[in-house]
Amino acid sequence: MKEKSGKRIKYIVVTGGVMSGLGKGITAASIGRILKDKGYEVVPIKIDPYINIDAGTMNPFQHGEVFVLKDGTEVDLDLGHYERFVDVELSREHNITTGVVYLSVIEKERRGEYLGQTVQIIPHVTDEIKRRIRSVAERSGADICIVEIGGTVGDIESMPFLEAVRQMKGEEHPDDFLLVHVTLVPTTLSGEQKTKPTQHSVKELRELGLQPDIIVCRCKERLREETKAKIAMFCNVEKEAVISAPDTDDIYKVPLLLDEEGISAYIMLRLRLLPRKHDDSWRVMVERAERATKKVRIAIVGKYTKLEDSYISIKEALKHAAMALDCKVEPIWVEAEDLEPMSDEDVSNFFEKAKVQGILVPGGFGVRGAEGKIKAMKYARERKVPFLGLCFGFQLAVVEFARNVLGLKDANSSELNPETPHPVVTLLPEQRNVKNLGGTMRLGDYKVTIKENTLAEKVYGKKEIYERHRHRYEVNPEYVEALEQAGLVFSGTCDGRMEILELPQDQDEGGEKEWHPFFFATQFHPEFKSRPGRPSPPFKAFLEAALSQAAGDDASPEG
Ligand code: GLN
């Protein structure tokens, strides 16, 4: 019953059962959105029961994209959902992993803080978990703290967290604590909704001393009344507390679907809260996006295209931009490696046949697929197809320009060829020889200064911006002058580092210099700060250019 800073914080803990991948993160983030629209400040905490300190060293094939917070913490993509749904900026403390908890317990033990006691999971680890949750919640000044426990109930890894939550439930005021359990209700071929997996999963929770207050059921279609009644009876919750979360084509509809099911009314009743306002802007935004009929075809030339989760923030940023422009993006996922054996002509034919209106090259690491990305960029530059390059996509655009415009045929990034005679992208001296994998990247928010009278200035409408970074390599300062003389414009910089590149949009009088309707790339990752209702400026400008391409405005092929 903590009452620091004058107000009692309410906790909503979200667990998951039956299996992973049910969209527990989206459910938790949606609950956050709904409560925010009722006028309450919400702070999310994501618990990841793995031993990694953060997600920085994790393979995107296994976990989907690594999301980067403003303070540079590398986290699970669920934190991205929280930032986008609740429209907050989070930091390291909002992601608690087993590694973080154990590290601090072990450090305390070494400092002698446990005064000779045997250090154990209960109470020492569980106390550390509770302390962290409460301290983040209290310092945030929020009204409601949503704690999502990653993994599935029954996993060995999540036991200490569930135990900590069980203790918290007893310690907080009964009006201040709710447990939401997300499960699956499969439908048989004959159309029957099966409740057994949910029953089993709730039984497992109960064995750990936890009784859910609300059960959110992922299902194909809304639960029938009798299904709800059955779950309520067997799982010991009220029927109003059994909420359908039917499949949907758009994750931004989830808050609306849950709200229609009465989840907010039930949460507010149980937490004894009254709505402070009824903000309808989310619904208006989703409905407007639904009505859009214009389409824009964007090729995303990447490396993990078989697992779209590894580009989730880019996908979402494209969606946000599309919502603002009343269109829908048709993404075309191109595996960069597939372009490598193709001739320039084959590459052109490929993109033309696919009728792409814009090409996006996202971030990435390593040699595989890099030459394919460079081919896609050459096509985009020469054929004047709108292009957006992000991070690795920015660096490779420099390589492509150096090779094909500046004429340095064997220019490269030293990440791809350490022996290249023209390392136009390279490690700066302070980045060489760093061994700790967790510590070598330039991460998080940096201030970027934008040059006057550039496309970048038009795109952002500002002279200074803050965007998130995640990279090791940089444009080599020794080549900047030559690249600029050949027509490339570095329109954004940070402490002498190149941050934005572009080609001029206007043809020069002699017609000699490179120009392009929209050729724009950033060393940073603008996708991480994009929000529904507040799209990232480069994404919006890119889609605008792609849309006008369709109208035939700038589609004069050359070369
Ligand atoms: N591999 C590049 C670097 O480390 C780009 C990283 C990225 O795209 N996130 O600098």
Image: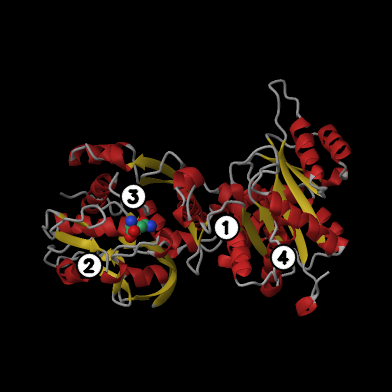
Residue in front for this viewpoint, 290 or 274: 274
Camera-nearest label, 4 or 3: 4
- Horizontal and vertical percent for residue 398? 23, 60
Q: Horizontally, is 240 left or right of 49 in the view?
A: right
Quadrant of ligand 1 in image: bottom left
Residue in front for this viewpoint, 6 or 162: 162
Q: CA distance from mark 4 to mark 3?
A: 60 Å
Comes first in the chain, label 4 or label 3: 4
Q: CA distance from mark 3 to mark 2?
A: 25 Å
Camera-nearest label, 2 or 4: 4
Numbered disc 1: secondary structure: helix
Q: Amino acid at mark 3?
A: Ile
Comes first in the chain, label 1 or label 4: 1
Instruction: Specify the label residue 117 is tagged with.
Output: 4
Q: Amino acid at mark 2?
A: Asn
**Residue shown at 29% from the left, 44% from the top:** 369
Camera-nearest label, 3 or 1: 1
Instruction: Specify the label residue 99 is tagged with.
Output: 1
Q: Which residue is mark 3?
A: 359
Q: Is residue 515 above or below residue 334?
A: below
Q: Amino acid at mark 1?
A: Gly
Comes first in the chain, label 3 or label 1: 1
10 Å neighbourhood of mark 3: few (<14), some, or many (≥20)? Answer: many
Numbered disc 4: secondary structure: loop
Q: Amino acid at mark 4?
A: Gln
